[in-house]
Amino acid sequence: MGYLPNATARALKTKRSQNIGVLFVDTTHSGLKHEYFSSILDSLKVEAERLGYDLTFISKNIGKFSMSYYEHTRYRNCDGVVIASVDFRDPDIISLVQSEIPTVTLDYVFEGHSAILSDNTVGMTAILDYVYAKGHRDIALIHGEDTEVTRKRVESFYASCARLGLTVRPECVKAALYHAPASSAAATRELLALDRRPTCVLFPDDYSYTGGMNEIESRGLAIPEDISVVGYDGISLSRLLRPRLVTFKQDAERMGREAASQLIAEIEGPEHVPARLSIPGVLLTGESVAEV
Amino acid sequence: MGYLPNATARALKTKRSQNIGVLFVDTTHSGLKHEYFSSILDSLKVEAERLGYDLTFISKNIGKFSMSYYEHTRYRNCDGVVIASVDFRDPDIISLVQSEIPTVTLDYVFEGHSAILSDNTVGMTAILDYVYAKGHRDIALIHGEDTEVTRKRVESFYASCARLGLTVRPECVKAALYHAPASSAAATRELLALDRRPTCVLFPDDYSYTGGMNEIESRGLAIPEDISVVGYDGISLSRLLRPRLVTFKQDAERMGREAASQLIAEIEGPEHVPARLSIPGVLLTGESVAEV
DNA sequence: TTGTATGCGTTATCAT
DNA sequence: ATGATAACGCATACAA
């Protein structure tokens, strides 16, 4: 009969807000535009709402006042925080994680805290097995900036090459930035200028690949006839490019869902033990890798 | 010295939460994955935070309890709500807008309330002028589901054709769904089956176009040699497809920013008069429209 | 079972 | 100016 509960008053009393903080920092100002992250956010939202929680974005600055993430989380009384797409070495992030507030990180592990991980080791292994089976023996890698994800993929790249008996030429491993086509374009330019061109190039992600794609095509080279390429992420773009891009699809939808349920389990049952979930992906084939 | 303000207690006292509700309902479960909307959300977030407000998602159900949008907004004590990507004829939306809570809608006008509008009339006009200049006289339109945006575009399509002296064949205007490649694929199939094939097809949006693209290519037809195509939105995908898609870019970044500043102006100054902002876009050219 | 006081952390008001 | 106090709306603990 017209009565409306008031979450504010309830939260003040119970110390529980039924509200989850979300940390999506647009490092490169592409946080939410990256389909991998927007998919995670989407499923995170759906699952959190299903379990009775709302989502609030947590930022460093609220107006003129600058707060730490921890302070902002406390300020908003969030019961827990999902941390994704940030610099995990930021002391501010570290102190949030080490506080009393339950946290779940995506694609990064803090010892003793829950983490949802895309299996980058398996992903890179699957890619190398695929291109090896296609006959490639001289494979270049363009990797993203130095993060835990990158380290996993690079390690797996070297390990797989060793297992397959491939020698990796140092000049064929280039550093670039994630989700930045121009950066991968520059790395591609260097690879194409080598005396002996690799037969296949692995890109940091599907979107970055488009920078390399333009670079290759503008030189009059054909994909995959002249050079083979592989992406990472498996976003819808990879299905729409021609030739269709071989890539490793990360199950972003499941990652968001698991992050929500894991965090809420921790909020509601403090005895709940932190878990480390590795979410499997799947190799998507296409026409971007030639048989050699 | 370790003192932390508590937004909950402050909100309880002041009736102001410095928190803005966001309504992004995944009608087709693609809400946040649509680059147009994720761009809006991104810039909305940045601007709101700059002005000292946080963002909380508002949904219909919070756990087992089902609430109206209005109830949910009150429950969370939101100072205002940004409404995007929803069914604006939903009575629940209408009662939220008609309540005492300040609202700003995107791409829809409620009389007496603020709205941020992408200029669909100008967009469609620009497209028709462009394809007319390229020599096309037999143009087909695949439009999205019945919304205000669609109505604007369809009206502008007919008006532009009339102005240019083009006759529109009824069988060349097809209904499909936004952001649903399969739906546009079906419409494309019907158009291709016509005795007299139109020389140019306008799609509901860039992403939907990919459904039509596959349909056209699978018939062995070439774009734009056999048939010309135009998208809408100007998302990054449109710059990456080959041939590059002619499309009308909506300034999503500015729309999000204006929505935030407009809503906050209204929250902070109740005397603030509701505004109707039309945000201009720009035609992006490509190679998807042939000279005929 | 049903009802009534107390306090959560703020801000605003009032008296000093 | 400075400091004490009531009230915001709810949940909880306790009394009836």
Image (spheres, coloured by chain):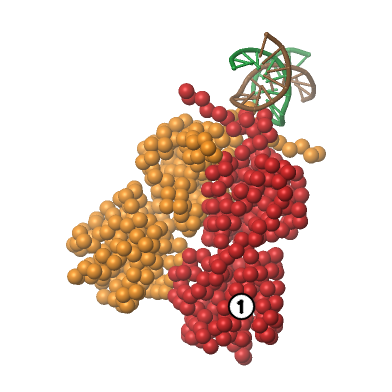
Chain colours: A red, B orange, C green, D brown
At x 53% / y 32%, what residue is drawn? B74
Q: In the image, what residue type sits under mark 1?
A: Leu
**Image mark 1: chain:** A
Q: Among all residues in the image, which is located at the extreme bottom?
A: A195
How many labels were placed on the picture?
1
Instruction: Check disc 1 and report its element: helix, strand or loop.
Output: helix
Tell me where residue A50 sits by quadrant: top right
Above or below, A273 against B73 in this view is below
At x 36% / y 41%, what residue is drawn? B89
At x 67% / y 31%, what residue is drawn? A14
* Percent of width and height locating residue B174: 27, 59
* Percent of width and height locating residue B211: 37, 65
Q: Nearer the viewer, residue A273 or B85?
A: A273
At x 69% / y 59%, what residue is drawn? A108
* Percent of width and height locating residue A33: 53, 59
Is disc 1 surrounded by few (<14), some (14 to 19) or many (20+) residues within 10 Å?
many
Above or below, B94 against B33 in this view is above
* Percent of width and height locating residue A163: 69, 81
Above or below, A210 against B183 in this view is below
- Location of mark 1 (residue): A128
Above or below, B261 against B221 in this view is above
